Image: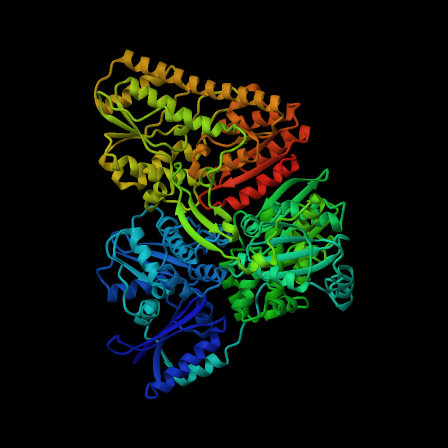
Amino acid sequence: MFRIGLDVGSTTLKCVVLNENNEIIYSNYQRHFAQIITKTKEMLEEISNKFPDQKEVSIKISGSAGMGFANTMDIPFVQEVYATRLAVKTLLPESDCVVELGGEDAKILFLDGVMEVRMNGSCAGGTGAFIDQMATLLNITPLEMNEYAKDSQKLYSIASRCGVFAKSDIQPLLNQGARKEDIAASIFLAVANQTIAGLAQGREIKGNVVYLGGPLTFFSKLRETFDEALHLKGIFPENSLYFVSMGTALYQDEKVFDMKQLIEDISNYKTSGGYSSLAPLFKDEKEYKEFSDRHGIDQEIETFPLVGKAYIGIDAGSTTLKAVVLGEDDKLVHTAYMSNKGSPVLLVKDFLVDLYTRFPGIEIGGLATTGYGEEIIKNAFQGDAGLVETMAHFRAAKKYNPEVDFIIDIGGQDIKCFKIRNQAIDNIFLNEACSSGCGSFLQTFAGALNQDIADFSKSGLFAPRPVDLGSRCTVFMNSSVKQAQKDGASVEDISAGLAISVVKNALYKVIRVANAESLGKHIVVQGGTFLNNAVLRAFEKELNIEVTRPLLSGLMGAYGAALYIKEKNIEKSNILTLEQLQEFKHVVKSVTCNRCTNHCKLTVNTFANNNIFIGGNRCEKPLQLKSKKEKYNMFDDKKRYLRKYENCSGTRETIGLPFALNMFELLPFWHTFFKELGFGVYVSPESTRDVYVKGQHTIPSDTVCYPAKLIHGHMEVLLEQQVDAIFYPCMSYNLKEGKSDNHYNCPVVAYYPEVVKANISAIDDIKYIHDYIGIHRKKDFPKKIQLILEREFGPFNKKEIEKACKKAYQEYDHYMQKIRDKGEKYLAIAKDNNLPIIVLAGRPYHLDSEINHGIDNLVCDCGAVLICEDAISHKVDYVKTEVLNQWTYHARLYSSAKYIAQSNDPMINLVQLVSFGCGVDAITTDEVRHILEEKNKIYTQIKIDEITNLGAVKIRLRSLFAATGLED
């Protein structure tokens, strides 16, 4: 009797038929496009026709989308992990580990020793669907991406934890002219790193490793990337696509089905229709007509004859390129809205050539650019100005509604929301953790359902029962949509449900709105996604308000840029002429800058007239420019102070210190202490991406902050140096500064030495000192540390311990005093020269360039004086707060905010750096904002992590500078 195994995955349907000898006599692999029942019936009919003598069969079902189908049809269901293990155990019994990537899920099965399964939980980044999305962004097929990757010359750091982060990394690279070959290879590396660091969670992938699943089957370069990352040669078995199907067929449940009857039963399969639904967007035609009339839905953008000079605004966005041409009378002359297809430069060239051809003799008064590709487009075509996109959208919104007090813009991959106060942008909200509320979210589902996006959007307007999809990861929501389809939901119901989900994501994940009143009375919605009338209706209905959607909703960035360049009234535009455009060239070269420790991966673009644009630099060094103004950067000063504590040899053993987390501030203390006792001291080098990669295989948590993840790499570096001991103590408390109710360390910082001990096996081969120590107890500390050192290194003299402790405390105080003295100096310089001051507040480890991404240089490049919070926090005594003030670094933040609020200098403002998962939550943020609002000070918070791209950071900083008059 033949045995059939069906693997019903999130995106594909796999089927195998095994004979009595467990040999595959039939196999099929298809994308099911949510038509699971139809595809299953077709496969079974094909099997029946191919083997007409097999009247009875054994059939089992597995897969993420197969359980409901199996239960309804009373067909045995086999859990897919068990099916995989059964197939591997049968066919590859010597296997130690299985890495399996599917359409929406990723799994690692550890078979050696204690069997363990690691699966993706809250996010589907790094799966097959993620790769599909990235290929779409590159405007190539996934298989083409594999071929491109084979010809790569260099690699970039690209996130794979979520599509929004990856797109935020990739889009600037495309806009800077990076080669698709290099980006494709970098995407595969990101997938490998996400699987190793995100799924393995500290358990080492070693031994005989088997690669399974569609992505690892179809993409040979991805397998090579895994091999390189794991330092081994993985096993790529025959029929790797069908291991779940084979394990399902091998499962010992020989329930017999009549083949003919089974096909007939599946043909008559009825859905339950029991999906959770929401109220329709419109009750009746009358309600829709009122909505339609109010928003002018049937109106089209009207253009007028050109009057005088033409002013061009170009918005090179994440997925689209928008252009607007205005005349001197402010009337619209011409517009363009195009998919950027990964080549924004060529699109702009074609647009400008068309403009010159369409309007012979046109005199261009100026070109302004904005969006992701602002810089490269400006440099390529000799634009006259660049404008940060927040300000471009603000200018455009004011043109429509001068009283606007809140703007929400939902684009292809990002959500931007601006709170307006006193005719200035007061607060900015960006989607920093998920892409599930953006336009590409709807585009993805329209494509998955074989629908045109315009038709798909319209279909949801009158859906009777919109599917309640909540707000989830884009990729995971595929499963919810497919389940709803199986339960009888129509395309119309799904379209409406997705529109509502987009709105909920924007409101409750990005803005975190409590009520409509908190947004404002004059709300302008814009961006291409709001051209979807179902999204617009869902937004108004969710908040029970009426909003303004400009007719130019999808062109607002370009429109604002055109208004901006017209207002500048420049004498003569530098834009390329038609003749120059016809000879236009664009040559791209990738290089690595070695002018500092950042080692930026640069993309050098050479355009017409040998105009050069360099992308990817964190400072001006690659540009070989000398700043005309002296820069005042306290981050640089701190690093210079810490570099004084060099590696040294001694008369005793060598102690290794990891230069990460709280060791950034306590390095002067511990280096002095051990050196004074005669120990050699080796401090791990500054963090780099390579340091992170060294330790990623031992990271046990995907959600812990990046500064903590970096510790693993620093430990690996210390182990490579073969130091005699590593000193990394647990410290519940910081030194007491008298500014708070207590002086706790962040729990991650305080107890991460325990995590290191539990997850880095090589640490067992060395003296690892991670005792609980309290240097805040100055009287007890010498006795405690003496006992610890004597346990590891033998007897010590009490007096020499006390002397070393005294020197260590003195050195720490000296270091902190130097920081405060430098702060005083910079405050005086700023006052004497009328310079703006940015207090860049965070944790000591935010000094690390690998963590802060060069934000300090961005601040100083804009002409501001950069001061750290610990340089001014001593100026304010205990701050009474409305929250429990018990964390040292929070207390410094509150004190700095108080100082800024009380300052009579309008030029001093606060920027707070926060690492994901570091514990600085909304309560702390609200308290800081409350303190600053006493004097109407500007405050912005920037979340930084290994997945942060500088594009979003620049938006925040440039918007802040624009509000303080620094934009130009």
Is 642 left or right of 402, judged from the image as shown?
A: left
Q: Quadrant of the N terminus?
A: bottom left
Rendered view: 883 above or below 565: above
How many numbered marks are there?
A: 0
In the image, farthest residue toward the bottom: 53
Q: Nearer the viewer, residue 599 or 575?
A: 575
| Quadrant in the rendering for residue 8 | bottom left
Give the image location of residue 17, x and y in percent. 32, 77
Q: Residue at x 31, y 37 (%)?
A: 715
Q: Residue at x 36, y 54 (%)?
A: 153
Give the image location of residue 94, x and y in percent. 21, 60
In the image, farthest residue toward the front: 579
- How did the renderer colour the structure? rainbow
Is 733 left or right of 235, judged from the image as shown?
A: right
Q: Residue at x 40, y 15 (%)?
A: 810
| Quadrant in the rendering for residue 439 | bottom right
Q: Nearer the viewer, residue 16 or 447?
A: 447
Q: Residue at x 35, y 45 (%)?
A: 693
Q: Quadrant of the C terminus?
A: top right
In the image, farthest residue toward the top: 799
Is 45 left or right of 891, judged from the image as shown?
A: left
Give the image location of residue 690, x and y in percent. 35, 43
Q: Nearer the viewer, residue 197 or 639?
A: 639
Can the viewer see residue 619 in this picture? Answer: yes
| Quadrant in the rendering for residue 217 | bottom left
Can the viewer see residue 920 in this picture? Answer: no
Give the image location of residue 918, x and y in percent. 47, 37
